[in-house]
């Protein structure tokens, strides 16, 4: 990494950590060898932060080799030893929290308050959680299930994990990929998005400084087409974990299945936000705006489709639009900023295209434009509310990944739940009601990996995150993630000490 652009020490105090390159292999940073460079851009200004040399296939090979060499020692460490290392890791991350927050806001454009209060504390908490969870990798207890044998189950690490993380939550996604894998005894090569490599590299450096052995955590920064596909298809990679769009997830699955790898996919979402007529409307409006706009809507669990029972529909639209209009766009580092830019001008233009096309068949109640003035250089887009679209329209069915909420009415409870399930996705959803029976029905019948009741977005380290349907399969966070990152082995002991078993007669006949 070099050419540190316009980022001042105040905006990015950890800049010196990235001087030696955007790859982190066997405990040291190096430059990529693909011959291609990529500029990391501050989306709030459009200005270059730094330029990195991207990884080629040789860099991926080196990272996989380092992870493979580190695997026997790390897998052979006791759960307590891995736990101690992760506890030290959590301490180092907490000490560097401000550096991480500023780097995350700089590369993503998210408000500093979001990085400080959500991304970084969440990552520290995930690390502390997996430090404890590393000691709890038990299988089922021993038992004599056949009568003549004692059986038990072992959980064993898989090997080298090759993971690919997205650009919307670079630090948290790096943690979600790395922590359960290494807590379970695996080693890992992570490819962050080339748009946002900074905090992934800082994360790996912090792991080394905490005493996690070289080669356990490796980072390769390159394109999906070159570095990503080579990592997924690498014969020495035993498992692939990918978070990103459903379309790219399909390609990842194609490559991974060619070598029969373990596969974990966390893909797109189009979360419904179902407001019944008995809901606390104050809470629902607040929740809709917060749930739709967090991280500028670049969140696969963001509230994107609000279904509101008809008696409350017009009031919900009016009040939600008014609250959206009060949200303050601005410099991510300014204390008064609520909403930052999208990740890039290309992403902003993509979001604008959805809204512009929707004008032909729906009502844009507020927003629907990029701001001018001081914000014109950045990838900003105003919070947008769209009403009266048809259920089968593009803006209702497709993942937009921006600060856009679509509102539709429904009449009966049956219709509301049917509409909530009527997209290919099933990652997250919420139901808003004071009726315990309505809430119970919604949680049972909405097909999503997470259903909130009277809230939308909160996640916790102890609970799993993952989807249904086209949103993928497998779980991040929680003890359930160990099901993704361990192999189950059945061990069976004969207890009889008898040479001739009764079942042998099926082979030896009546002899």
Image (cartoon, rainbow, N blue to C red):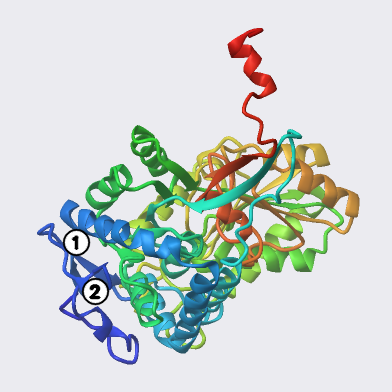
Residue at the spot 69% in from the left edge and 39% down from the top edge: 495
Residue at the spot 58% in from the left edge and 58% down from the top edge: 302
Residue at the spot 47% in from the left edge and 76% down from the top edge: 85
Judging by the rendered image, the residue that carries numbered circle 1 is 54
- Dot 1: element: loop
Q: Is residue 100 left or right of residue 87?
A: left
Image marks 2 and 1: residues in contact by CB distance under 8 Å: no
Judging by the rendered image, the residue that carries numbered circle 2 is 28
Looking at this view, name the residue that lies furthest to the bottom.
10
The crowd level at tag 1 (other Cα within 10 Å; few <14, some 14-19, many 20+) is many
Looking at this view, name the residue that lies furthest to the top.
510
- State the quadrant of the C terminus: top right
Q: Is residue 244 visible?
A: no
Q: For residue 347, which quarter of the picture?
A: bottom left
Judging depth in this view, the residue of 176 and 425 nearest the camera is 176
Q: For residue 92, which quarter of the picture?
A: bottom left
- Dot 2: element: strand
Q: Is residue 242 above or below residue 379?
A: above
Mark 2 or mark 1, which has the lower sequence index?
Answer: 2
Nearest to the eye among marks 2 and 1: give it: 2
Residue at the spot 31% in from the left edge and 71% down from the top edge: 214
Judging depth in this view, the residue of 99 and 27 nearest the camera is 27
Residue 48 is situated, as x and y percent measured from the top left of the image, at 23, 74
- State the quadrant of the N terminus: bottom left
Q: Is residue 59 left or right of residue 42?
A: left
Residue 94 is situated, as x and y percent measured from the top left of the image, at 49, 85
The crowd level at tag 2 (other Cα within 10 Å; few <14, some 14-19, many 20+) is some
Q: Which mark is residue 217?
A: none
Judging depth in this view, the residue of 300 and 216 nearest the camera is 216
Q: Is residue 30 left or right of residue 454?
A: left
Q: Is residue 463 above or below residue 505?
A: below
Q: Is residue 200 visible?
A: yes
């Amino acid at each position: 990494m070099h050419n540190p652009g316009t980022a001042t020490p105040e905006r990015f105090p950890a800049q010196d950590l990235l001087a030696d390159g955007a790859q982190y292999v066997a405990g040291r940073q190096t430059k990529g060898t693909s011959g291609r460079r990529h500029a990391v851009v501050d989306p709030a200004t459009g200005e270059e932060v730094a330029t990195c040399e991207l990884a080629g296939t040789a860099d991926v090979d080196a990272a996989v080799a380092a992870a493979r060499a580190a695997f026997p020692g790390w897998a052979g460490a006791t759960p307590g030893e891995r736990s101690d290392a992760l506890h030290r890791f959590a301490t180092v991350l907490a000490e560097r929290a401000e550096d991480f927050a500023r780097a995350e806001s700089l590369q993503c454009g998210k408000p500093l308050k979001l990085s400080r209060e959500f991304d970084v504390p969440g990552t520290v908490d995930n690390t502390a959680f997996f430090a404890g969870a590393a000691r709890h990798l038990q299988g089922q207890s021993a038992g004599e299930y056949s009568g003549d044998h004692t059986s038990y189950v072992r959980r064993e690490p898989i090997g080298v994990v090759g993971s690919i993380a997205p650009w919307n939550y670079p630090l948290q996604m790096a943690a979600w990929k790395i922590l359960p894998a290494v807590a379970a005894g695996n080693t890992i090569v992570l490819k962050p998005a080339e748009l946002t490599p900074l905090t992934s590299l800082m994360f790996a450096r912090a792991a080394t400084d905490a005493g996690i052995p070289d080669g356990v955590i490796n980072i390769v920064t390159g394109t999906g087409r070159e570095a990503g596909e080579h990592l997924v298809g690498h014969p020495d990679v035993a498992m692939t974990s990918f978070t990103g769009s459903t379309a790219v997830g399909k390609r990842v699955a194609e490559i991974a299945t060619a070598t029969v790898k373990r596969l974990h996919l966390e893909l797109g979402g189009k979360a419904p936000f179902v407001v019944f007529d008995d809901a606390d409307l104050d809470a629902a409006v607040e929740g809709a705006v917060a749930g739709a706009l967090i991280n500028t809507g670049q969140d696969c669990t963001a509230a994107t489709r609000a279904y509101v029972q008809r008696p409350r529909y017009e009031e919900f639209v009016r009040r939600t639009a008014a609250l959206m209009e009060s949200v303050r766009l601005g410099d991510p580092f300014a204390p008064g900023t609520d909403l930052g830019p999208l990740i890039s001008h290309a992403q902003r233009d993509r979001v604008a295209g959805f809204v512009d096309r929707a004008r032909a068949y729906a009502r844009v109640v507020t927003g629907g434009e990029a701001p001018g003035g001081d914000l014109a250089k950045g990838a900003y887009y105003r919070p947008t509310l769209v009403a009266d679209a048809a259920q089968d329209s593009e803006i209702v069915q497709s993942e937009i990944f921006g600060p856009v909420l679509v509102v539709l009415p429904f009449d009966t409870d049956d219709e509301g739940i049917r509409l909530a399930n009527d997209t290919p996705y099933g990652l997250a959803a919420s139901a808003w009601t004071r009726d315990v029976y309505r809430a119970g029905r919604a949680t049972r019948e909405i097909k999503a990996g997470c259903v909130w009741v009277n809230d939308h977005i909160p996640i916790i380290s102890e609970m799993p995150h993952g989807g249904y349907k086209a949103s993928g399969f497998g779980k991040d966070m929680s003890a359930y993630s160990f099901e993704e990152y361990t192999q189950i082995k059945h061990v069976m002991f004969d207890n009889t000490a008898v040479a001739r078993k009764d079942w042998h007669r099926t082979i030896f006949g009546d002899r």
